[in-house]
Structures are given as C-alpha cells and as structure tokens.
Amino acid sequence: MDLAHEEPTVDGEAEEMDRELLGDTHLREPPLYSSHFQGMVRQKAYIFDGHGNFYNKEWDLAEGRDNEFCWYHVELPKVNEKLSQSAQYLIGVLCPPLKLQDILSLVSNGPFCGHVDGALVFRVNSPGPPSSDFTFRIAARVTENSVITVSLGRVPRLGFSEIGQSLLSEIPRVDNPYLGGEQKEGGGIVIKEHVLEFLLTMNHSEEADNPVPKSVSNLVVHILDTHVDHLQDIVTKLEMDLDSVELQMDKGDSTWGASISTSEREVFFKRLVC
C-alpha cells in the first residue's frame, strides 16, 4: 500500500466539525484573498490595535504603525508536492515585499531560528510526506510591527472570532429526536452527540475564545500554543483509536477484523505508521 499517495482525512473532518461549532464561518473569519494560485493557498490577514481589539484587513503585507501590528497567515496545501512548489506558492503571495532569502527561510526543510534581513525567523518541521496527518510544519517571520506565518495545512482555532459568538458561552440542550419541536421551547442551543464527543476530546477552547494579543510577543505565543494544541488533538485521537483496538483484543473478539472494511483498515494503519 502506497501511503504517500493517500488523501488526508483529518483536516477535512476537523474543518467540517468547526463549521458545525461556529455556524456560518464566513461572517466571522477574515476573507480569503485571491492570488496566482487561487484555490491552492489560503490567506488570512488581521490588524491589532494593541488594546485588545482586532480587525480583518486587506492583504497588503504592510507593517503596523505605533501600537498597531499586523498578522498575515499563509496556509499551504497539505498534498504531496516538492518544496520548490511550496516556494512558488509563497513567492506568489509574499513577493514583493519579501525577498528570495525570506522565502527560502520560511519553506526550507529542517528546524531553523535566526535573523534574516532584519527579521526574526523560526521554522519547525517534522519529517514525513506533506499529505500525512502526522506531518507538521510551521514557520514565522517576526518584525517589530508585523508577523508572517506559514503552515502546512489547516491549524484549527488559529484565528480569532467574536467573543459573543462562542458556542461555549451558550446554554446547551440535549438533542432528543423523540421530543421533536418541543425541544425548542425554553431557549438554549441543541448540542448533537457527535459535537459533544468532539468537545470532550479538545485540550483547549474554540477559536472564539482565543484572547486577543496586545503585542507581537503575545501573538507569537498564541501561534505556538495553537500549534501545540493541534498536536495534542492528534495524539488524543490516536490514543482513542489504540484504546479501542486494545479493548476489542482484550475481549477476544475474533470478529473484529472481519467487521471493518479494507478502506477502514487502511485509514487506521495509515494513522499508525505515517
């Protein structure tokens, strides 16, 4: 089985789950900007006033002024492509004003931390094919009034949403199909079982509860914390899969192997070895 060409599934499932948690996300997230590689690269841009407020902004890669600072995030596609293709994506959305040395420092393999053309650049990469659910890469270019970040695939809850739109601040109600329309009486929001299970496995709050940074250093800490949270989510999911297999083996259930399809086996073993 050629695992390198398997399509990733976790990112798609997580994105669908976030849509259920946050509802109509296009009202809350910054716009996605078009580029030469439209449809392949996702971009988000924020500006912070330094007093706990943030706004969506245009993709101009400008620096903030006075207490203001900007954040530009690029999400590279999580598919099996050469690094040169990823570099072309970044050139298309970050140049100008970035130079070739900036692009190479953000997209190259291996860990890195140092100064490049007056900016602090750090990069954290894990080995493995880009399409693997267990391959993580994040890089950042930090100046006094701006941060540019690049991630491989989607990092859940990396951005910011309005506090008043948080699911965690709502009064929950149980999703009971036997009650029909009666469950709408008394207010509250219905929480479906699969959403509740997802929330119970999270090691952190949802996007709407992210504290808004008041400085560039606060923003960098938020980016790193969110990436660590994402890693913990993946590890938690893997542990749950292993516990399920161990439970079936302890029961001596000889029919377990026959009860799952070939595709389900491939997905499970992909999570173990990729």
Image (tube, rainbow, N blue to C red):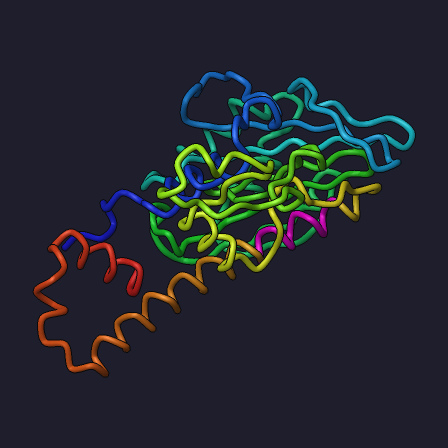
Residue at 12 percent of width and 68 percent of height: 257
Q: Position of residue 162 (x, y in %)?
A: 70, 32
> Considering depth in this image, is 214 or 66 the residue closer to the camera?
214
Residue at 45 percent of width and 47 percent of height: 195
In magenta, the rendered stretch is 219-228
Q: Is residue 71 above or below residue 220?
A: above
The N terminus, quarter of image: bottom left
Residue at 52 percent of width and 31 percent of height: 23
> Considering depth in this image, is 232 or 97 the residue closer to the camera?
232
Extreme-right residue of the structure: 66
Q: Position of residue 163 (x, y in %)?
A: 71, 37
> Considering depth in this image, is 169 or 118 the residue closer to the camera?
169
Count up the numbered dots: 0
Q: Is residue 121 left or right of residue 154?
A: right
Residue at 67 percent of width and 17 percent of height: 58
Q: Is residue 119 left or right of residue 226?
A: right
Q: Is residue 219 above or below residue 125?
A: above
Quarter of the figure with residue 7: top left
* Residue 70 is a magenta residue: no
